Amino acid sequence: MDKPLTQHIKKDGSWLSLQEYEAVGGYQALKKALTLPPAEVTTIVTDSGLKGRGGAGFPTGSKWKTVPMGADAPVTKYFIANADEMEPGSFKDRLLLEGNPHQLIEGIIIGAYAIQARFSYIFLRWAYHQAAKAITRCIHEAYEAGYLGEHIAGSDFKLDLSLHTSVGRYICGEETALLNALEGKRANPRSKPPYPTVHGLFGKPTIVNNVETLCNVPLILTNGADWFMKLSKTGEGGTKLYGASGRVKRPGLWELPLGVSLREILEEHAGGMKAGYQFKGVLPGGGSTDFLTEEHMDVPMDYKSVNAAGSRLGTGTLIILDDKTCPVGMVRNLEQFFAQESCGWCTPCREGLPWTTKLLDSLEKGTGKMEDLDILTFQTHYMAPGNTFCALAPGAMEPLQSALRLFRADFERHIHEHKCPWE
Amino acid sequence: MDPKHTLTETETAAIREIYRHFPEKSAACIEGLKVIQRHRRWVSDEAIRGLAEILDMSPAAIDSVATYYSLIFRRPVGRNVILICNSVSCWIMGYDQVAASVKKHLTIDYGETTADNRYTLLTIPCLGTCDHAPAMIINEDLHRDLNPENIASILNTYE
């Protein structure tokens, strides 16, 4: 079982029905979990080393542990699957949502049991219409089979699950912004603390976990924490959905042991660069991660190693920059995206991102000046972590700050040649 | 004013059914906007006032939500809405040539609707199908691996 997360997903694009999912052991993990005390389920997930696959990489079990439990805890708690995949260059949750929604639903029910939640939601981005169809059908099947509603699988546990389809905005993927969107409000992030695990949806304790994270949960319950830990090549448990887009021979998505090298993903799985194109750099985990270059080819793609190399694993979907593509143009595209998607709540982000975009525009047009590079560097400090209300702007600065360092000569050529050298 | 004057009975019933499931009526705001848009393709000022009546909110509060979300249309749109991905992977793979081809074929720019109300052209952030870039969505259909040459035949299938 080298691809436990995706092994049952069909090639024809149709999703696994309840019957098909049960035939491959589906919902057995839930039945097992229901025989354990909720705290023990959390312990198993903690011991597995599972970290959040949405980008931040926070240990899942540790998150669950901070939810108030016991007689004094609020009766109403919520459990939410974050299926708002909108990080530029990321397309991994789509496969799990379209291919096997029951695996996600089972993960949600187990997680909800661990924190004793009464209600759960799948927060899905608007664009995933096929996933919406699949999830709607599978939720219906799960209710019919007694996996949702009252007396789940014959136990005393009850849980309702609904699908919420979003109406756009990248910021909805931020967990507190997501909560505001679910409450029907503008999706501005909330200040933390209090953390959602204590004061979340409608003021009640709430867990928000990424789709890929939750799809791992039934596997961990079935096979044990040690098994999960051993799936990876490093000290962090599990497999990971890695992807690659850009001018590689075979853009795509692969489930691989966590910690395979950047080189292995690029050369063995993505097939290397297309004829006529040379590798120049890569955003290893979506639009809001720092560039890595040729010297990082042997970095193991796990959370710790990518951090040590100066970037983040993020969503694990590589965006490849080739030598025929302008690095300044690529960063401008990213900053335009972040400027557009800023919620406008805090000043550094609302003002800083359009300013950054304007400077990059001027570089691309050939009207940039050397001092613009200093202003861009200033922006990367001005919008650094801790200076903004949420992680959007600091994330936006990651590709910029690394591009300024790694592709400095390319920025300067735009100024000296009074045009984009790639045009 | 009776909300029936601005929203249909079907719309009103659908919105009331939604807020029953939430601890607060206002939680149905986004879902209510979606109901209206499903019936009318866009959300007019009158519809905002109608929704405000049903949810006991001010029209301004509803509008602050409506204008926040990029896929709630506060201006009329055509029968087919084209959303072209302009994010990074599609940019690398030459989405701008695809967009130019769409604009040329329809003789409209972003944010515009054709004179016959057949198409509206907009952009959308990353569609999550980056291994098949460039990509676009028309209504609810995803089109991938686009090139400037196959645009006309795709567009022509939408009446």
Image (spheres, rainbow, N blue to C red):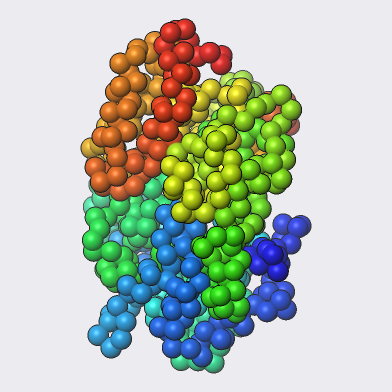
- Expressed as whole percent of the image width and height from the top left, the position of residue A140 reads 58, 74
Seen at 29% across and 30% down, the residue is: A379
- Expressed as whole percent of the image width and height from the top left, the position of residue A267 reads 69, 41
Q: Residue furthest right?
A: A12
- Expressed as whole percent of the image width and height from the top left, the position of residue A411 reads 44, 19
Report whether residue A164 is seen: no
Viewer-side residue, A15 vs B139: A15
- Expressed as whole percent of the image width and height from the top left, the position of residue A319 reads 56, 39
Seen at 33% across and 57% down, the residue is: A176
Viewer-side residue, A50 vs A22: A50
* Residue A15 in the image: above or below residue A46: above
Seen at 47% across and 63% down, the residue is: A51
Viewer-side residue, A61 vs A16: A61
* Residue A230 in the image: above or below residue B126: below
* Residue A43 in the image: above or below residue A343: below
* Residue B81 in the image: above or below residue B4: above
**Quarter holding the N terminus of chain A?**
bottom right
* Count of numbered marks: 0
Seen at 43% across and 67% down, the residue is: A60
Quarter where residue A158 is shown: bottom left
Report whether residue B47 is seen: yes
**Quarter holding the C terminus of chain A?**
top right
Quarter where residue A294 is shown: top right
Relative placement, left or right, of A250 versus A79 is right
Q: Which residue lies furthest to the top in this view?
A: A417
Viewer-side residue, A90 vs B52: A90
